[in-house]
Image: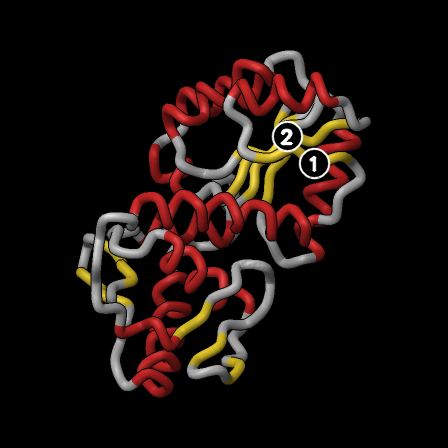
Amino acid sequence: MYVIVDERPIVTDGYVANFSREGITSVGLLGDDFEDWLQTAPATDLDAVQGFLLGDCEQRPDLPELIHKRSRAPIIAMIETRCLTETLNLFGAGIDDVVRKPVHVREILARTEAVWRRSQREAAKDTTVIDRSARLKVYFDGRDPDIDGEKMTLPRRERQILEFLVRNRGRRMTKEQVFNAVYGAFTSDVDESVIEGHISKLRKKLRQKLSFDPIEVRRYLGYAFVN
């Protein structure tokens, strides 16, 4: 799930529509509404956020610090015109990347993933593990994953679940967290139980290709992508 913050509904509605065309769940919020949501949302909702897009809003300079207190997700600022002073100020405020509108959502996905990769490399710098799942390559940009160099075609929801679990490798994610990541924290017309079916099918396909199951399931506790 992506969260777009801007004072102009035409901007948030436009990006929500563009994300939807790419099969990605997103929500648009005004600055004040976003601040209220950020401070009161449960951790399960925030863990589902893959990226924050901050457009034109009065609170933007103060939002990165608030976001970092509650979420690890990348923060990308969207500006109207190129301005060195504004760009430097945004980076100084804690923004992870700055883009000039109009920008395609696929570029946003790629830039978000680049930020995730940097943070994960930093976290793993002093850790050495044997990764049996290294044969699996996940792209996070709408492409299907590869196993042993061959494309593994997956339905959109299964691919998004795989991406979410791989991004949170080693962390146990609840059914609610997985649901929010794939369907959105504000979705009420789909039952959470659909996640169980998606994951069951995904695990079967991964076992067939890898000869082992990289997704660990614990009843009542959730799911984890393990080595």
Left or right for 174, reference 63: left
Q: Which residue type carries mark 1?
A: Val
x and y percent of residue 86 in the render?
69, 18
Residue at 60% x, 52% y: name it: 110
Q: Residues within 10 Å of mark 2 (few under 14, many from 20)?
A: many
Q: Is residue 15 above or below residue 64?
A: below
Left or right for 5, reference 13: left
**Which quarter of the image is occupied by the C terminus?**
bottom left
Q: Does dot 2 land on a helix, a strand or a loop?
A: strand
Q: Which residue type carries mark 2?
A: Ala
* Res 52 quadrant in image: top right
- Which residue is denoted by mark 2 in the rendering? 77
Mark 2 to mark 1: distance in Å?
Answer: 6 Å
Q: Does dot 1 land on a helix, a strand or a loop?
A: strand
x and y percent of residue 13 in the render?
73, 37
x and y percent of residue 200 in the render?
34, 73
Q: Are marks 2 and 1 in contact (CB under 8 Å)?
A: yes
Mark closest to the chain's N terminus, 2 or 1: 2
- Which residue is denoted by mark 1 in the rendering? 99
Residue at 67% x, 57% y: name it: 22
x and y percent of residue 84 in the render?
72, 22
Residue at 53% x, 40% y: name it: 51
Q: Is residue 91 above or below residue 115?
A: above
Residue at 35% x, 39% y: name it: 44
